[in-house]
Image (cartoon, rainbow, N blue to C red):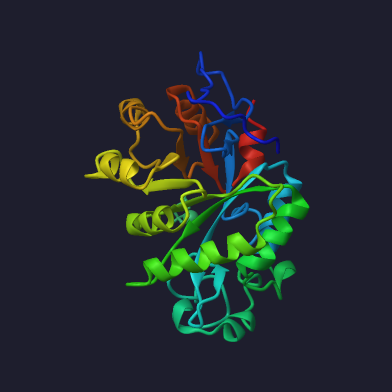
Amino acid sequence: MATAPKAKTPARTKKTSEKDGPSGPSFFSSGFAFPPFIGHRGAARHAPENTLAGLRAAASMGVACVEFDVRLTRDGVPVLFHDDTVERTTDGRGRLGALTLSQVRRLDAGAWFAPRFADERVPTLVETIRVLAALNLAANIELKPEEAQGAATARAVLAVLRERWPRDRPRPLLSSFDWSVLATLAAEDAGWPRGLLIRTPRQPQWRAWAVRVGAAAIHCGARGLDRAGVEILKGAGLPVAIYTVNDVRRARSLWNWGATAIFTDDPPRLLAAP
Ligand code: G3P
Ligand code: MG
């Protein structure tokens, strides 16, 4: 992906009719380039979420940017994982944060999805960075801390990024529902762009937190979101990314209302929008 130009005013893609589909990437002053859609947890409808197979599937489908979730193992290693507990997406039991890396690595994170993904492992952030570079994928890293582990999670992710993120690649966008995590990231190293995750524009205090953490984008839930809601989000003057949309008509409406990007489990469906 090209390096984003330094622009004071965010470039926006104007949509003119309900027939418009996604257009090219939008570049913002944070340096993070939003494509029209982002593969959610890789490409969660097509491959096991938050796995390297998922990233490869997304890349093979023409996805330019993937979102994935990161948690810490008991011994403090950032790995790709969504839930608090491992039952839904692995063959193990218990809390992810209660397992050491070596215990997590013994889990099968693919067979639950389909037999052909059996033996897929829970990836570390370190190995994921290598794969992102090899696949030329941009990334949104969502940090999901355990209770009272926000600062530790932020610091562990930053430590990996500083050491391992290739200097010649655009930096990933870091997001979290836990806004204190974003505040820690901003205080520790403001050079990594941050996205404020919210569930609805009606959520109190989000604008103040967007300013406080120096957010480069607002990421908002699609549920119940209408044109007026998107207008409210856009009022913050930042790119707006909406999760999670797998329906083409719904995606079109959101783009036409001014959403910058859409998180989807099903990139081919949005790509093939007639
Ligand atoms: O980052 C957007 C989206 O992934 C947030 O929700 O629960 O799928 O991580 P969740
Ligand atoms: Mg997520």
- The answer to whether residue 50 is seen in the rendering is no
Task: State the residue at coordinates (68%, 43%).
Answer: 63
Q: Quadrant of the C terminus?
A: top right
Identify the residue at the far top of this view.
16
Q: Position of residue 43 (x, y in %)?
A: 62, 52
Relative vertical location of residue 208 with respect to residue 250 in this rendering, above or below: below
Q: Residue 146 appears in which quarter of the rendering?
A: bottom left
Name the residue at 60% across, 53% down.
45
Residue 220 against residue 156 in the figure, above or below: above
Residue 195 shows up from this direction: yes
Left or right, 135 with respect to 251, comes to: right
Q: Position of residue 51 (x, y in %)?
A: 64, 64
Q: Is residue 161 above or below residue 216?
A: below
Q: Position of residue 181 (x, y in %)?
A: 38, 59
**What count of labels does the image hold?**
0
What residue lies at 39% left-to-right and 48% top-to-bottom?
197
Q: Position of residue 207 (x, y in %)?
A: 28, 39
